[in-house]
Image: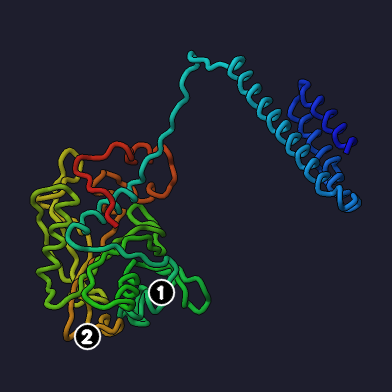
Amino acid sequence: MSDIKKIKDDYLGKLSCELNLDEVNQIKIELFGKNGLISNSFKELGSVQSEDRKKFASDLNFIKDELQEKINSKIQEIEINEINSKLKNEKIDVTLPERDINQGKIHPVSQVIDEISSIFSEIGFSVEEGPDVENQHYNFTALNTPDNHPARDMHDTFYLDDKKELLLRTHTSPVQVRTMLKSKPPFKIIAPGRTYRSDSDQTHSPMFHQVEGLHIDKDINMGHLKGCLNYFIKEFFEVDKIQMRFRPSHFPFTEPSAEVDIGYELKDGKIVIGEGDKWLEILGCGMVHPNVLKNVNVNPDKYQGYAFGIGIDRLGMLKYGINDLRAFFDTDYRWLNHFGFDPLDVPSNYRGLSR
């Protein structure tokens, strides 16, 4: 036991001197490491006579605690001294010029999706999403698109396998199919998202964005469709009146089908949406084909409804005066800085995202 007390006195003396953190850690290893002096003393307990073992263990624990407390106190003292030294010697130069702040912008596509979702949410639509990679069934077959339809051709569709089974979706209508298969009517949804077609020019891009709407319930008719689209167009373009006409068309998944035109006029070289003597095609729509309802296990004798598809990028171009669709995807910061939206500068008529 005299050896242990000598070790204690020696190391308490060392710890009283001016030390740095590395030196204190070295003392800690010498005492309590795997082969440290105190650690080895505990290993010798078995060789101490039984009548002396209890006192030896008690004294050893007391010495161990005293040394550990001294080490911890020394470490704390060193850390405090280091902090005080930094506070004394380091200072902030208040004359240093401020750093530039580069704030990002919201992309017009994201902004338009947000606006569309907000408007439709106000009249009871919910937002649904689906995968970009689809199969033939969801993208074509379930939507009443025949095998010989031109949309299935290679020049229109990006196929991902030799069997032409997997593909990049050509519209977001597969989301409607998936939603109806996993639930029961009524349905009232919109499905915004990326779509892909083999096309590229000033008004077309291999990747673009669409929002498709679907409302299935009892006694739904074309009047409901017209009222819904009339409300949306006025809200989106922020006009009080809108001229709108339905032209007969054909889509495999709707019957009857229609293209929707809206009136506009040119003022100072800019398109002004509202009333005018010119017409602009803006979307396709129609009543959901009975075969589509049968394919998703919905009784067409009991339920009917309407569907529509709108080009999100095209809406953004019309509303915000963008004349080339390809610029949306050029990742040009200068373009985004001009046409993008400040996330902190919220317009007075902005509704916020409703998802």
Q: Where residue 54 sits: x, y (%)?
A: 81, 48
Amino acid at pointer 1: Asp
Quarter of the image with the N terminus is top right
Q: Residue at x 46, y 77 (%)?
A: 165
Which residue is under mark 1? Answer: 153
Q: Residues within 10 Å of mark 2 (few under 14, many from 20)?
A: some
User: In terms of sequence position, does the residue under pointer 2 or pointer 1 come before the other?
Assistant: 1
Q: Residue at x 78, y 21 (%)?
A: 17
Q: CA distance from mark 2 to mark 1?
A: 31 Å
Q: Where residue 347 sits: x, y (%)?
A: 23, 40
Q: Residue 29 or 269: which is nearer the viewer?
A: 29
Q: Is residue 104 above or below residue 111?
A: above
Extreme-top residue of the structure: 95
Q: Residue 15 or 227: which is nearer the viewer?
A: 15
Q: Residue at x 79, y 29 (%)?
A: 23
Kindly indicate the quadrant of the structure image that contains residue 230. Answer: bottom left
Q: Residue at x 81, y 43 (%)?
A: 33
Q: Is residue 25 above or below residue 239?
A: above
